[in-house]
Amino acid sequence: MLVVAAVIERDGLLLVGQRPAHKHHGGLWEFPGGKVEPGETPAEALARELHEELGLTDVQVGPELHRHDDPTRPLTLLFLRVGSSWRCSSGPTWTSVRPSSSCSSRARASAGVS
């Protein structure tokens, strides 16, 4: 299964949301995204998920930043950068966070955050 996640950064802040308490990994923070459906490219799936979850339109999906293969199940998580040019209608409450100073410089560089 291929899952995509958006890395959306503005002014050094990353957009993340908190998973509902009743779901798998409930209460943890995550990047917005979801499963790639049959016939979709990763970019199309991410644009669709961002529209469904956040009401974002005119999403410009950029390059792949990181790929993670889950060793415990057949799942690949693909992180894609999303440009800062998008519009938002209504949707769930999301918050922006600044990466921790303890975050490695490599991880920060991978996310495109200085």
Image (tube, rainbow, N blue to C red):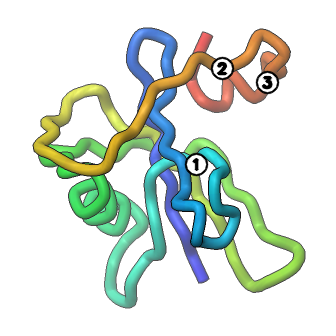
Q: Earlier in the sequence, mark 2 or mark 1?
A: 1
For label 1, the residue is 30
**Residue 41 vs residue 33, the one in the foreground:** 33
Disc 2: CA contacts within 10 A as few (<14), some (14-19) or many (>=20): some
Q: At 39% across and 83% down in the image, what residue appears?
A: 37
Query: What is the distance, in whole Å, between disc 2 and disc 3 at their CAs?
Result: 12 Å
Q: At 60% across and 83% down in the image, what residue appears?
A: 1
Label 2 is placed on what type of residue? Pro
What kind of element bears circle 3?
A: helix
Disc 3: CA contacts within 10 A as few (<14), some (14-19) or many (>=20): few
Label 1 is placed on what type of residue? Glu
Q: Earlier in the sequence, mark 2 or mark 3?
A: 2
For label 2, the residue is 99
Tag 2–tag 1 contact (CB < 8 Å): no
Q: At 25% across and 63% down in the image, what residue appears?
A: 52
Q: Which quadrant is the C terminus positioned in?
A: top right
On residue 68, the disc is none
Kindly give the residue lying farthest to the front in the view shown: 21
For label 3, the residue is 106
What kind of element bears circle 2?
A: loop
User: Does residue 91 appear to the left or right of 29 in the view shown?
Assistant: left
**Residue 37 vs residue 31, the one in the foreground:** 31
Q: At 80% across and 70% down in the image, what residue appears?
A: 70
Disc 1: CA contacts within 10 A as few (<14), some (14-19) or many (>=20): some
Tag 3–tag 1 contact (CB < 8 Å): no
Q: Position of residue 102 (x, y in %)?
A: 84, 15
Query: What is the distance, in whole Å, between disc 3 and disc 1 at their CAs?
Result: 19 Å
